Amino acid sequence: MKTIDMKIGDALGITQDIKEEILSPKPLVPRPDDTLEHTDADYKYSRENFYSLVERGQDAIDGILEVAKEGEHPRAYEVVGQLIKNVAEVTEKLVDLQDKMKKLKEVPDHAPKNVTNALFIGSTKELQNLLKDKSNGSDKLQR
């Protein structure tokens, strides 16, 4: 008995055999290190895209505004309002991007240099054992 594929092939006049190939999977691309160079490149790329979007949005606003003035249709003015709102949101995202980048670069400078208050989390017995071991010269925590 013929399979469905063979029956369809016969009905359409296709005599080509179907070959199955098992392809080996592509190797995984290693994730790049999160270095400052990559961060700066991503920031620059995002910034350029935001500027491009704002410029295109301005051109679109100018074009649709002319159409709205000529046709005086309320829907055209509604579209102008939506475009203005979208361009304003993109400019806000540009400012947010700058703020995030500024905070990202400030983090290493504001990190604490040393810890003055250490907190022990454990039972009283574990603390006593730790102090007892410290006084005996051992640094292990006994449980």
Image: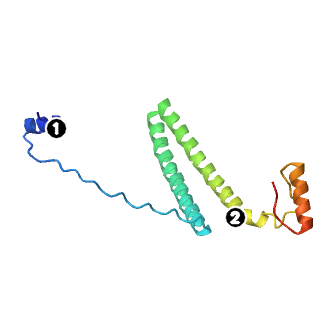
Image x and y of residue 72, in percent: 47, 33
Q: Residue at x 86, y 53 (%)?
A: 126
The local secondary structure at tag 1 comes to helix
Residue sitting nearer the eye, 18 or 77: 18
Residue 12 as seen in the image, left or right of residue 141: left
Question: Where is the N terminus found, in terms of image quarters?
Answer: top left
Residue placed under numbered mark 1 in the picture? 5
Q: Is residue 79 above or below residue 127?
A: above
The image's mark for residue 105 is: 2
95 to 82, vertically: above or below: below
Residue at x 28%, y 54% (from the top left corner): 22
> From the viewer's perspective, is residue 115 above or below residue 82?
below
Upstream in the sequence, badge 2 or badge 1? 1
Q: Quadrant of the C terminus?
A: bottom right
Q: Pointer 2: residues within 10 angstroms few (<14), some, or many (20+)? A: few
Q: Position of residue 2 (x, y in %)?
A: 12, 35
